[in-house]
Amino acid sequence: MYDELKKVIAKSDNIVFFGGAGVSTESGIPDFRSVDGLYNQKYDYPPETILSHSFFIHKTAEFYKFYRDKMICTSAKPNNAHIALAELEKQGKLKAVVTQNIDGLHQAAGSKKVYELHGSVLRNYCMKCGKFYGIEAITESTGIPKCTCGGTIKPDVVLYEEGLDEDTIEKSVKAISKADVLIIGGTSLNVYPAAGFIRYFQGNEIVLLNKSSTPFDNEADIIIRDPIGQVLNECVLD
C-alpha cells in the first residue's frame, strides 16, 4: 500500500489533506474518541458538556479549569505527519490542509494554507470589545481571563452548540471539490458537519490513513492502518 500511495502522490499536484485528532496524537496531544481519549476519562461533567457554549457562558470558571488542563499543550511539537504535509505543500503538490484540530501544529511545521474548521487555541478574543489575545492570555492567567476593558476572554475555538465559520467552510469545500487526490487522516469521520465535507470531493483517489475503520472505508481507494506519521514519513520524507 505504501508503494501505491507513493505513486498517487508522485503523479498529483492537486492534493488536499483532511485531518482530525489522530494527526496530533503522535505529538502527545490526546484525541477524543479512542479508548484513552478525553471522552473516556472521568470528570464532574462529560467533556461534551464542558466544551459547550452554554457551559462556557454559565460555568465559565469550571470551563477554564478543564480547558487549561486538557485542551492546551504548549509543549507539543509537529510530528512527521505535519512535517511531511508541509513538505508536500512546498513541492507544490498539496493545495490545502483542512483540519478539525485546534493545536496550530500544521502552521508550526510550515504549512501555509490551513483551514481550521474548529478554530485554534492560539487565538483568543474579548467578548466585549473584540480585542485579540495570544495563548498566553489563557496560560498565564488563573480563573476567568479578563481583557483590559473588563470583558471575558474566550478561546477562538468552535464549541458544541456553535456553528462553524462560514468563510472557512467555503474555502474548505472549494479546495476539496477541486482536488484530484483527497488524503484523509486521523479522523473517525463521525463529527458533522465537518465529516460531510468529503462528499464534495470529485477527484480521482481517496486515501484513508486511520487506525480504525470509518463509515467511508468502502469509498477509499487506498486504506492504511499504520500511524500517520510513519506512513507520510516513508511516502514523502524518505
Image: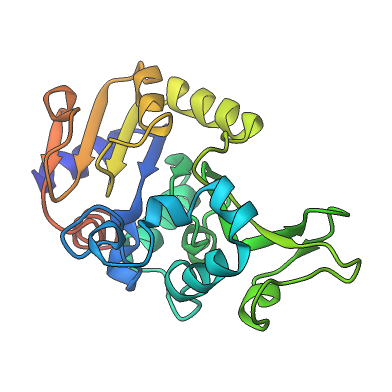
Is there any visible trace of residue 189 in the rendered image?
yes
Query: Where the N terminus falls, by quadrant?
Result: top left
Residue 118 vs residue 201: left or right?
A: right
In this view, the residue farthest toward the right is 149
At x 35% / y 62%, what residue is drawn? Answer: 24
Q: Position of residue 154 (x, y in %)?
A: 68, 58
The quadrant holding residue 229 is bottom left
> Is residue 102 placed above or below 108 in the rendered structure?
above
At x 51% / y 48%, what residue is drawn? Answer: 52
Q: Position of residue 125 (x, y in %)?
A: 75, 58
The quadrant holding residue 237 is bottom left
Q: Position of residue 135 (x, y in %)?
A: 64, 71
Q: Nearer the viewer, residue 27 or 92?
A: 27
Residue 72 vs residue 213: left or right?
A: right
Query: Where the C terminus falls, by quadrant?
Result: bottom left
Is there any visible trace of residue 113 in the rendered image?
no
